[in-house]
Image (tube, helix red, strand yellow):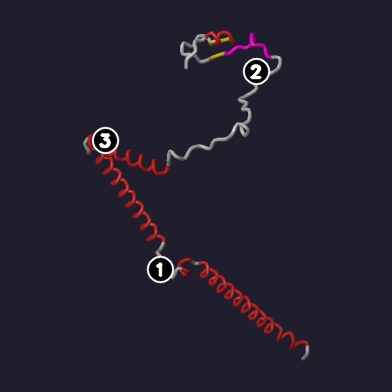
Amino acid sequence: MNKDEKEKHSPEIEREILVEKVREIETAKLEAENSAAQNSERNNTAKILNEKRELGEPLSDVEAKREMSQRSRRNFLIGGATALVGVFGWRWLPDETKQNLLRRTFEFNERVSQIFYSPKRFAPEFSRELAGARVNGAEGLSENFNPADWILGVGGLANGSEDLILTLDDIKALPRVD
């Protein structure tokens, strides 16, 4: 073939090569979609449990919005009506019936708690060897602590004029109450 013939054939050859590449790409896409579909079917619980599913025709955007608004409005109205029936039903009941209902509920809760919370189950007890010294804080317990200089200020009293300042001797002089 001479040079002119090669130039004539080269666009045709290039087109055939491009068509083949497109076919390869389309085939690869189909294989990937089939593989993804098989994986989704393996992970689909409806398929695993052999549940029958029937899907309806897809809804248009307008139909979907209309159906959602009807369901939302309907559910709201049903919920509101149920709440009103409950409130007015409670008000309609005589006080004696309300007290009996509440008492029976309390007794039921008491029986349930007696079943689950047995008095035979006590908190664990530990020996003295396992117990350690409990320190609630070291404020004011330093080595140079002077009890005569220690004061307690109580602020925010109801009469509001002055804060109450107490020394350790004032606290010790207070009456003891058990």
Which quarter of the image is occupied by the N terminus?
bottom right
Distance from Cα at disc 1 to Cα at disc 2 = 77 Å
Dot 1 alpha-carbon crowd within 10 angstroms: few under 14, some 14 to 19, many 20 or more: few
Please report whichever mark, 3 or 2, sits nearer to the chain's N-terminal start.
3
Q: Earlier in the sequence, mark 3 or mark 1?
A: 1
Identify which amino acid the numbered label 2 is placed on: Gly
Residue 76 image position (x, y, % from top left): 34, 49
Read off the magenta span.
145-152
Secondary structure, mark 3, is helix
Residue found at x 39% / y 41%: 114
Query: In the visual, does 111 lie left or right of 27?
Result: left
Given residues 166 and 5, the one toward you in this image is 166
**Predominant SS along the magenta part:** loop
Circle nearer the viewer, 1 or 2: 2
Q: Residue tagged by mark 3?
A: 99
Report if the CB atoms under discs 3 and 2 are less than 8 Å apart. no
Which residue sits furthest right? 2
Mark 3–mark 1 Cα distance, whole angstroms, equals 52 Å
Q: Residues within 10 Å of mark 3 (few under 14, many from 20)?
A: few
Residue 147 falls inside the magenta stretch: yes
Q: Position of residue 144 (x, y in %)?
A: 71, 14
- The numbered mark at residue 140 is 2
Residue 127 sits inside the magenta stretch = no
